[in-house]
Amino acid sequence: MHEKMKNLLVRTVSGVVLAVVVLGAIVWSQWSFGLLLALLLLVGMAEFYALAEARGEAPQRFIGLVAGMVLFALNFAFVCDDIQILGSANRVFAGGMAFLLLLLPVMFICELFRRRENPVGNIASTLLGVIYVAMPLSLMCYFPIIASDVWNPWVMLFYIFIIWANDVFAYLVGMTLGRHRLCERLSPKKSWEGFFGGVIGAVAMGLVAARVLDGSYAAWGGLAFVASITGVLGDLVESMFKRAAGVKDSGRLIPGHGGVLDRFDAMLLSAPFVFVYLLFVM
């Protein structure tokens, strides 16, 4: 089998498996959705710290991962309390928040005893892993309930469909019509034509979501527009990190696709913007 065809087959099969796992976890239950996000968080943060280490930084991996998981657990518990799955979690939430607040300055104390050459860079890269990976994945806990009073996985599903539609249409339009480079320094293959094609495809998917969920066409179209623009920027941000580290992929977990950051980079940057949009518009 020709090497290109073999790579395409591997990429297609792993992509289908990934889609089934992700969509299945979201639809199955809130707990499977939470487990999915937690696994993405752990792997994504590990990949980010590996990129930082490739640049010569020495992030405090253990403390960063613990801080990220505590942040996620607090938000997941808060969401579960809202829909009365866990009952009252106020004390757990308060205790976790206190632990997180103490954990952050512990990073500075630990750096005193590590005797590394760049303590500022080490602490900054540790915190950035929490902000870049753990925070947006924690915010996604709210997507299925923020626009309704009960758990509704379709909101999260259509958010993912919008991101995927943006990627597919950007690729197709860019491949056929792409002439003007969007950001050649970071991603030579991206074009302005593909960018606008992706936005159109994402907005079209947003209108489909409005139709299926009996929602506002304007609101869903706006959400798709926001997710599309910020999703493209998220892809460029991850390309910036990889280029600085001198690597092609953030990891090898997904055959033919790279790592978690490679597959979910658009969502990591778009999630905070979509969260604010859902909170104030939807």
Image (cartoon, grey):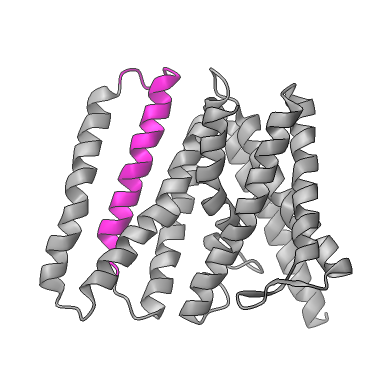
Residue 195 place in picture, x, y as percent:
74, 60
Q: Can you say whether 236 is above or below 106 in the image?
A: below
> Is 71 above or below relative to 198?
above
Q: Measuring 15% from the left and 73% from the top, which residue is drawn there?
A: 114
- At 53% from the left and 71% from the top, the residue drawn is 240
Specify the segment rendered in magenta.
59-88
Q: Quadrant of the C terminus?
A: top right
**Quadrant of residue 42 within the rendered picture:** bottom left
Q: Is residue 123 magenta?
A: no
User: Where does residue 229 sit, x and y in percent of width and height?
Assistant: 65, 52
Give above or below for 125 relative to 4.
Answer: above
State yes or no: residue 75 in magenta. Answer: yes
Q: Nearer the viewer, residue 185 or 90?
A: 185
**159 sits left or right of 246 in the view:** right
Query: As rendered, which of 119 and 258 lies closer to the eye?
Result: 119
* Position above or below: 105 against 193: above
